[in-house]
Image: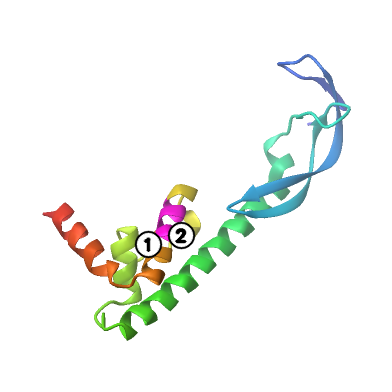
Amino acid sequence: MRTPHTRVHPVTGVKLRRAERDITVVYGGMTRTARVKGWFPEGADDGLMWREDGAAADRALAEMKAADARALRRAARRIVKKLRAARYETLTFRGLSALIMGTPGGFDALDHTNFRQRHSAALLLALLDKRPELVREIEAATSSMMA
C-alpha cells in the first residue's frame, strides 16, 4: 500500500504533510527523544501517525519503563537487606514483593504494571527505607484485609 504524501487533519481541517520529526517521550521523570514518521502541519501542532510510525516512541517508552522497574527492584533488594539488619529477619525479597505488590513475583512483573501501581510501590519502598518498623503495620493491615 502506498502512503499518501499529504492528508487533511480530520478534526482541524489543516493540511498535513508526510515527514519525520523528533518527539519527546516522558515517563516517570525520565525523557527520551524519538524520531517518528507521520503527517504533520506547518509548525509544532499535533500530527497523525499510523501505528508503525510511532514504533520509535514505543521503544523509548518501553526502555524507560524497564529502567524504572530495574531501579525499583534494586531498591526493594536494598530495603530487604535493611529490614533484615533491623531485626526483621524473616522478610525476603519475595515476601516484600507479596506484601507490597500482592504477589511474590510482583517486583519481577514491574515491567508490565501500570504507572500508578509502580508509583504506589515506589512510595511504600521509600517509606520503608525511612521507617523500617512500618513493615509490621503493613503486615498487620494486609492480614486484616485478607481475613
Q: Is residue 145 left or right of residue 50?
A: left
Q: Against 96, is 25 above or below?
A: above
* Residue that carries the numbered disc 2 in the rendered image: 110
> Hey, which residue is sitting farthest left in the picture?
147
**Is residue 102 shown in magenta?**
no
Residue depicted at 40% across the width and 70% down the height: 130
Residue depicted at 30% across the width and 64% down the height: 98
How many numbered circles does the render carry? Answer: 2
Q: Amino acid at mark 1?
A: Gly
Q: Is residue 135 visible?
A: yes
In the picture, residue 10 is in which quadrant? Answer: top right
> Hey, which residue is sitting farthest front in the picture?
131
Quarter the N terminus occupies: top right
- What kind of element bears circle 2? helix
Mark identifier at residue 37: none
- What kind of element bears circle 1? loop
Near mark 2 (Cα within 10 A), the count class, few <14, some 14-19 or many ≥20, is: many
Residue 122: where, in percent of width, then height?
45, 60
Cβ–Cβ under 8 Å for marks 1 and 2: yes
Magenta: main secondary structure equals: helix
* Residue that carries the numbered disc 1 in the rendered image: 106
Near mark 1 (Cα within 10 A), the count class, few <14, some 14-19 or many ≥20, is: many
Viewer-closest of 146 and 125: 125
Q: Is residue 60 left or right of residue 8?
A: left
Viewer-closest of 140 and 12: 140
Q: Is residue 135 left or right of residue 75?
A: left
Q: Amino acid at mark 2?
A: Leu
Residue 109: where, in percent of width, then height?
43, 61
Residue depicted at 33% across the width and 61% down the height: 100
In the picture, residue 120 is in which quadrant? Answer: bottom left
Which range is magenta? 117-123
Residue 8: where, in percent of width, then height?
80, 18
